[in-house]
Amino acid sequence: MTTPDDLAALLPLPPAVFHILVALADDDRHGYAIIQEVAARTAGEVTLSAATLYRSIHRMLEQGLILETHRRPAPEHDDERRRYYRITPRGRAAARAEARRLEQLVKLARAYGIAPARA
Amino acid sequence: MGLYRALLTLYPKSFRAEYGGEMCAVFEQRRHSAGGPAGRAMVWLSEAVSVFGNAAAVHWDLARQDLRFTTRALARTPGFALTAILVIALGVGANTAAFSVADFVLVRPLPYPDSDKLVKLWERAPEYQQLELSPANYRDWKAAATVFESMGAYLPVESNLVGEGDPDRLAATAVTSEILPMLGVSAALGRIFTPADGEDGAPGTIVLSYGLWQSRFGGEAGVLGRRLLLDGSPYMVIGVMPRGFHFPSRDVALWMPFTFDASDYEDRDNNYLNVLARLGPGVSQDQAEAELGVITARLEREYPRENEKTGASMLRLRDYFSERSKLLLLALCGASLCILLIACANLANLLLARTLARQKELALRTALGAGRERLVRQLLTESLLLAGLGGAAGIAVAAAALPLLGRLVPDTLPIGQVPSIDLRILFFAGCITALTAVGFGVLPAVRAGREGGFEGLREGARSGGGPKQHLRAALVIAEVMASVVLLVSSGLLLRALWRIQAVDPGFRAEGVLTVRTALPYPKYYMTEKRVEFYRQVLTEIRAIPGVTSAAYISFLPMDMGGGIWPVSIDGQAAARQGGTTASLRYTTPDFFRTLDIPLRTGRGIGEEDRGEAPPVAVVSESFARRYWPNADPIGRTFDFVMQKRTVVGVVGDVMVRGLERTSEPQVYLPAAQVPDSSIIFYAPKDLVVRSTVDRASLVAAIRDIVRRVDPEQPVSHVRGMEEIVAEETASRTVQVRLLGALAALALLLAGVGIHGLLSYTVSTRARELGVRIALGARQGDILGMVLGQGLRLAAVGVLLGLVLSYAAAKGMSALLADVGPADGATLAAVGGLCLAMAAAGCFFPALRAVRTDPITAIRAE
């Protein structure tokens, strides 16, 4: 299954992929919900286009970072055109590895006084 | 919304099918929540821009995925992959090389501006289509002609260069001041000649070729104004021509002004000038020929004796190469087209077989939901990858082959030796193979997909058979046919080559070394001085242990075919026409012994034949037969080279003009009887030495000896006499080797084709064979069935091929040296070879068929 080497080959993750993984971390979501979640979490700074979102999803499905889930919400909250995506353990590991990578970078920047010290 | 949906067509179909609906929904929602027309416009714009970038990225992702998949699939079947790549490489490479050379020689304009207007002019006499002009006729043509913008004359010469390192013998050309400006190329350094440089009494000037400037003067700009000694006279370097400039042939190292003095115009029969002209604006070749016709007719009236029946002939400089060169190249192109045809047929067969073998896999993947578009994309990737790799290897093949083809570039054209790869042709050959790859790699799969993908999944489904099998059989027939054409052509050319090589040149070349020591003038104007040089050099050379004999002669046979002189008998006036000329050579004693030319009667040239002794001649048998058919020629006299000569000996005939041309009868005169400072062109300069000494030490010894006798005398043109004879058939040898290699390749490819087809048939018919064996078919029957199938295809291919090759041979009969186009031995050998190859191709499939185990074959179903 997932080996560290295997994951390392995926890093660094494209920003869109990282945001999607984070958006799916706590719940399964459909496409538009992912866009909304990302926008909300970044205070509107990151707005994924449909094209970027689905190209990323296509790739992430192939890389096994997410999967399409067939568990759907109650019919009154659902739209049949929607497809729902769920993060896989591999996806979670990838997001974690990416976060660690970013953290290292920030640490490095701090050590050289480029980034402000932790409050 | 509609516009957005339309934008989505930029995506691959499979992607659109998968996500198109959702993307539209998301787009819709984003627009709704944007609020206000400005916000909606922003959303629209950002989404549209994003589609472009992402659609391209998705295509790229898919292509990478297909490429990975294809690489893995090909790596699993390396035999298939390598064969396909090799087949494409050979097809593309052979064609790129052959057509690059053909285009270089036959089509591409010469490297001079407006080169189509440059024409070569000759006199035309009844026996000579192209005869050089005499200075007097040149002067009169030039004065009278109005159709030319410019007209000039040139003469290839050789010169001894002394004073810059070792003395050297260089090919040079004397040009009138019109020639270089007419070509339209200016000097890279310094200047070219002006009319003043060519005036009588002007100081000597020369222009160097780029090659000589680099090799001898290290490319220094300071060479301008340098004084060099050529044949003992001083010349000043006034210019250097640019790199890649050649005229009239590529070996010329320098140019000097051509000067005429009044005496040059006296003899209208002394034809030696090469004449080049540039047609005036708007003047056609026909108009120019018409005017020359009028001029030559007038000159014939004015000089009825010298210009009897003398007209003019004209040819574009571009077309000044032999019909032979053209045929050689066309034959090569034809052969490489055959190879391309075979390569494409083979590739088609390989891909068809692969597709058929993968029908189950493809059907399975269709069943698992891979859309047809994805399958086609992937097959397309595979085909294009193979074509790309094959094409790249083809470039390597072409690059390796081109230098070998340099021999086919005629020396008479002022172009470089090795053509570069022609990108247009490479592109063309690449396209053909790519189309083949796509046509046969993708289309069958598409059709199979359309005809209900599940068919292939049915257990025991028998793929192949039907129209596709017929197509494959037709392809094999085409391959056999093309290889027969190639084999017959190269077989006939080989027979022609053998026939020519078997021609007796009239001398024995083995063990003879030749070198040139061309004595410069005016230093050696006096015959006595030359004879003394020959005597000293020959005496020392004969003293070298292992040397049997040595001699000097005017020109070596075959190396120089011309050098003829009119003969007259009993005061009958010598005419230029009518078979009254003989090949003239001056030699020192021992020449006949050195080349092993048999003495038929009388004696050879001796030491006693000195200047003051009576003029004598040794003649060839054909000469004696021509003038004294039924009498003893010894003691007879004839007028030759301004004197009455007495025949003292008769020797065997020599193929002076080469193995494939008729030579004039030969006359040998004593080197010591050349009149002082007269006909110096014929003064002996080629040394022949028969010895058992190894070449390197003999050459070193000769150089030492020549240096001792005259330290300023260069030694050049070191060659074995055998090389000179081999040179006669060199272009043929190259051609036979090339065509032979292509034919062998074709035969091999056709064999592979037959093998592939039958292997496939046998494996798809395993059940039928099993049933037959179970029902009691004997091994012989099965063997006969499989062999029969293969041999029937081969036989059809051979028959069609023989018909085609008869036509091909007719087209190149000029190359065949009297070997008939329907040469029985060649045809039989080729037919037999092809059938044997077919039988070999059938062998393993047939063996497998015979060994089919009925129980396994039937149970497997």
Image (cartoon, coloured by chain):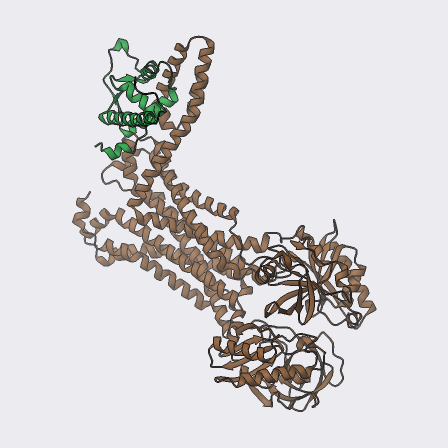
User: In the image, residue A95 lies at what x, y percent?
Assistant: 27, 25
Q: Is residue B457 above or below residue A95?
A: below
Q: Residue B316: which quarter of the image?
A: bottom right
Colour of the chain lettered B = brown
User: In the image, residue B748 lies at what x, y percent?
Assistant: 37, 57
| Residue plotted at (43% across, 47% down) | B391
User: In the image, residue B851 lies at what x, y percent?
Assistant: 21, 55
| Residue plotted at (80% across, 60% down) | B143
Colour of the chain lettered A = green
Any part of residue B309 in sight: yes
Any part of residue B669 in sight: no
Q: Residue B751: which quarter of the image?
A: bottom left
* Residue A54 left/right relative to B547: left
**Is B240 in front, or is B770?**
B240
**Is B163 in front, or is B793?**
B163
Image quadrant occupied by the N terminus of chain B = top left
Q: Is residue B267 above or below residue B552?
A: above
